[in-house]
């Protein structure tokens, strides 16, 4: 009886998420601001977010019981390293929602895998056509999460992971978007500066902007205690990774259970890591 009640509670929460995906309307002035005003370090969600019921019906049933994971944190904080480690350990569980950006790729970054690297004019066209769930501008570059990227993951039946800037997180929270919200931060600004310098990809000007932005984000997270479900301090990678897995354990457990049930029903009998 308790297990059935737990199932109903999760189903109710998921139905709220589905309703948001089907027809949630946001208000924003971004489209006009971007066209007529200078760029600012702000983020806004597009005017209308709609994923058709026809497309939504293609999503695997077990995906309907799993929250997306929204992860945020300053560049150099370690979130990308933690995500890469999780995806290596659980290769069938996660799918990273690949964002679009107007910045240049760093060494080793691949188009379509780490980001979709596009020109500013193309990014502005996507904003105008309402193709983003959210988008942000900072450090002189645009970043955005497209509707199609999230829907493709939903259709695959994997846990959707979104790397979102802080203001984008605020917008998702205001929209009551059901997700597990995780912030990954460095132990100190000094450690963050050292990590960014070791990358060797920043000019003095861009480094100064990133550090200023990171300091503002860390202070904001301290002052907005309800913004994230979990704050992971990445001082030692193994400990930070363990904290991350503990934060998403319920999502992993449901995924493993439902994937196993699906494979057994299909007669595959494939072992799933847990």
Image (cartoon, helix red, strand yellow):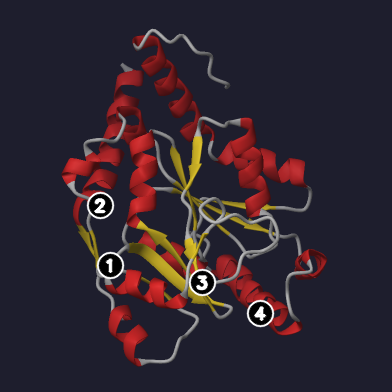
Quadrant of the image occupied by residue 210? bottom right
Tell me, yes or no, whether the two marked residues, 3 and 4, touch with CB atoms within 8 Å. Answer: no
Of the numbered discs in the image, which one, if any, rests on residue 102? 3
Disc 3 to disc 4, how far (Cα)? Answer: 20 Å
Q: Earlier in the sequence, mark 3 or mark 4?
A: 3
Quadrant of the image occupied by residue 125? bottom left
Disc 2 to disc 3, how far (Cα)? Answer: 28 Å
Disc 1 to disc 3, how far (Cα)? Answer: 17 Å
Give the labeled residue for mark 2.
20
Disc 2 to disc 1, how far (Cα)? Answer: 16 Å
Front position among marks 1 and 3: 3
Using the image, determine if residue 133 lies above or below residue 11: below
Q: Earlier in the sequence, mark 1 or mark 3?
A: 3
Give the labeled residue for mark 1.
130
At numbered mark 4, what does the secondary structure look like: helix, strand or loop? helix
At numbered mark 3, what does the secondary structure look like: helix, strand or loop? loop
Tell which of 138 and 14 is nearer to you.
138
Using the image, determine if residue 67 lies above or below residue 106: above
Q: Which residue is at 80% across, 70% downward? A: 197
Disc 4 to disc 2, how far (Cα)? Answer: 34 Å
At numbered mark 2, what does the secondary structure look like: helix, strand or loop? helix
Q: Is residue 243 left or right of residue 122?
A: right
Disc 4: CA contacts within 10 A as few (<14), some (14-19) or many (>=20): few
Q: Is residue 49 left or right of residue 136?
A: left
Give the labeled residue for mark 4.
212
Q: Earlier in the sequence, mark 2 or mark 3?
A: 2
Disc 1: CA contacts within 10 A as few (<14), some (14-19) or many (>=20): some
Front position among marks 4 and 1: 1
Q: Residue furthest bottom?
A: 37
Using the image, determine if residue 151 lies above or below residue 43: above
Q: Earlier in the sequence, mark 2 or mark 1?
A: 2
């Amino acid at each position: 009886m308790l297990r059935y009640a737990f199932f109903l509670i999760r189903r109710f929460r998921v139905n709220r998420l589905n309703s948001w995906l089907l027809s949630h309307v946001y208000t924003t002035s971004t489209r006009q601001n971007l066209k007529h005003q200078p760029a600012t370090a702000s983020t806004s969600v597009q005017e209308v977010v709609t994923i058709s019921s026809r497309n939504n019906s293609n999503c695997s049933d077990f995906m309907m019981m799993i929250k997306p994971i929204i992860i945020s944190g300053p560049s150099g904080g370690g979130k990308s390293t933690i995500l890469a480690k999780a995806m290596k350990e659980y290769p069938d569980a996660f799918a990273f929602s690949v964002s679009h950006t107007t910045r240049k790729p760093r060494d080793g970054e691949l188009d379509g895998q780490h980001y979709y690297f596009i020109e500013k004019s193309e990014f502005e066209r996507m904003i105008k056509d309402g193709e983003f769930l959210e988008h942000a501008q900072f450090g002189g570059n645009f970043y955005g999460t497209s509707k199609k990227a999230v829907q493709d993951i939903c259709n695959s039946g994997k846990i959707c992971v979104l790397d979102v800037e802080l203001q984008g997180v605020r917008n998702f929270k205001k929209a009551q978007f059901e997700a597990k919200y995780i912030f990954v931060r460095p132990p100190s600004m000094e450690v963050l500066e050292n990590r960014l310098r070791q990358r060797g990809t920043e000019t003095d000007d861009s480094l100064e902007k990133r550090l200023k932005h990171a300091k503002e984000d860390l202070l904001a997270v301290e002052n907005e205690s309800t913004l994230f479900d979990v704050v992971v301090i990445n001082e030692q990678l193994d400990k930070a990774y363990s904290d991350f897995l503990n934060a998403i354990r319920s999502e992993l457990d449901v995924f493993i259970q439902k994937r196993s049930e699906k494979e057994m029903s299909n007669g595959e009998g494939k072992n799933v890591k847990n």
